[in-house]
């Protein structure tokens, strides 16, 4: 409430200064990692584009590095309208929009091309639309990336090597069901707590895409990185219906186009980090296992696929796998 006393005189001063009565709306956007990370690159592209496209009527205030809380809290705030936008992984999103959980299945996507094609195609676009009935407006799928395991104990080459490790996971049941089949002990935890938990040895390891491992400096607290690529981690740029419903049709188009450009920029940053970041992490002292026995993980996860088929329907899983 207090804030309003500050905003009102500022807005009046701004209008007086420009001699115009057209007010400027500042939208709060939050994400987990730093402003120079993939989420920051995508969000900045979006923010620059809506500001240009609306002749400055809309602009952003960015809250990188989990400044507004964990992803679950940010999604909740966007639903309530106390936060305007979030660029978030699907980690906790399935707890709000159950249909989305299907894309969190381990080894569902073959590679980046496959994943991006599905997310931008009819299946992914239907999932974006499904958010509406849950009080969230999905503007576009952005990207977090394929997730890889890090830990402080030993190099992981096969699923057997992962057995017994206590690993932080996202608050995501699909992941946890899958990872249990690798023999790891999944420990769900919000991302902002993760660095400290690794540092203090509360968990042995964690799994995240290269851009997250890099930007969060996990090399300072984890010795081993294995390029397991065991699951694709999509992300979404989501706007609150409170903001969305006030936009003119023309402004909605500006926001949607900006979100598409944000997605392209964010994915490009993921590609760049995958190409250059692993060498950087080695320089920073990590021991990297590039030759992981993917077959051993795929084999281990088979029983979890029975659970997934029950929950989502085998045909729906197959439809994603069939996208070429
Ligand atoms: O979305 O929680 C996680 O591990 C996420 O991958 C990270 O916060 C970026």
Image (cartoon, rainbow, N blue to C red):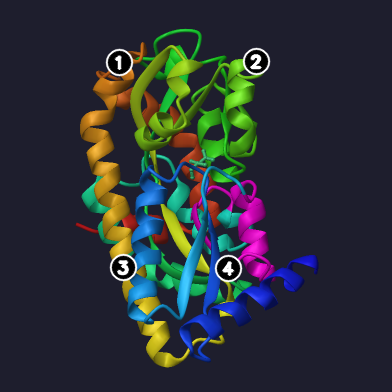
In space, the residues marked 4 and 3 are separated at their CA atoms by 18 Å
Helix, strand or loop at mark 4: loop
Asked if the residue at tag 3 contacts the one at tag 4, i.e. Cβ–Cβ closer than 8 Å, the answer is no
Q: Quadrant of residue 301?
A: top left
Residue that appears at 39% across and 36% down: 209
The numbered dot on residue 84 is 4
Left or right: residue 34 versus residue 157 is right
Nearest to N terminus: mark 1 or mark 4:
4
User: Which range of residues does the magenta coloring cover?
Assistant: 68-92
Dividing the picture into quadrants, the one containing residue 78 is: bottom right
Q: Residues within 10 Å of mark 3 (few under 14, many from 20)?
A: many
Residue located at (62% from left, 56% from top): 74
Provide the residue designation for mark 2. 200
In the rendered view, does 42 fall on the left or right side of 275? Answer: right
Q: Quadrant of the C terminus?
A: bottom left
The quadrant the N terminus occupies is: bottom right
In the image, residue 47 sits, relative to residue 22, either above or below, namely above
Dot 3 or dot 1, earlier in sequence: 3
Q: Residues within 10 Å of mark 4 (few under 14, many from 20)?
A: many
């Amino acid at each position: 409430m207090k804030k309003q006393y500050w905003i009102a005189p500022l807005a009046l001063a701004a209008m007086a200064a420009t001699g115009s009565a057209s007010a400027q709306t500042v939208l709060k956007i939050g994400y987990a990692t730093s402003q120079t990370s993939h989420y920051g690159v995508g969000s900045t592209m979006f923010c620059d584009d809506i500001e240009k496209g609306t002749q400055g009527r809309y602009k952003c205030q960015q809250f990188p590095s989990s400044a507004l809380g964990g992803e679950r809290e940010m999604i909740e705030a966007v639903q309530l309208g106390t936060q305007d936008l979030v660029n978030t992984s699907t980690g906790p999103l399935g707890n709000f929009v159950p249909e989305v959980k299907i894309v969190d299945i381990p080894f569902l996507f073959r590679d980046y091309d496959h994943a991006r094609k599905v997310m931008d195609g009819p299946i992914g676009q239907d999932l974006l639309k499904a958010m509406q009935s849950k009080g969230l407006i999905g503007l576009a799928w952005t990207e977090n990336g394929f997730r890889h395991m890090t830990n402080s104990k030993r190099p992981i080459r096969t699923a057997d090597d992962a057995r017994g490790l206590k690993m932080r996971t996202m608050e995501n049941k699909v992941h946890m069901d899958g990872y249990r089949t690798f023999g790891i002990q999944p420990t769900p935890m919000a991302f902002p707590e993760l660095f400290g938990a690794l540092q203090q040895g509360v968990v042995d390891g964690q799994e995240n895409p290269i851009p997250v491992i890099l930007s969060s400096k996990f090399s300072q607290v984890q010795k081993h990185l294995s390029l397991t690529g065991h699951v694709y981690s999509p992300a979404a740029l989501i706007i609150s219906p409170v903001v969305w419903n006030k936009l003119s049709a023309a402004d909605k188009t500006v926001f949607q186009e900006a979100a598409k450009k944000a997605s392209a920029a964010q994915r490009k940053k993921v590609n760049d980090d995958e190409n250059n970041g692993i060498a950087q992490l080695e320089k920073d002292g990590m021991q990297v296992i590039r030759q992981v026995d993917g077959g051993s993980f795929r084999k281990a996860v088979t029983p979890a696929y029975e659970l997934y088929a029950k929950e989502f329907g085998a045909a729906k899983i197959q439809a994603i796998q069939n996208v070429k």
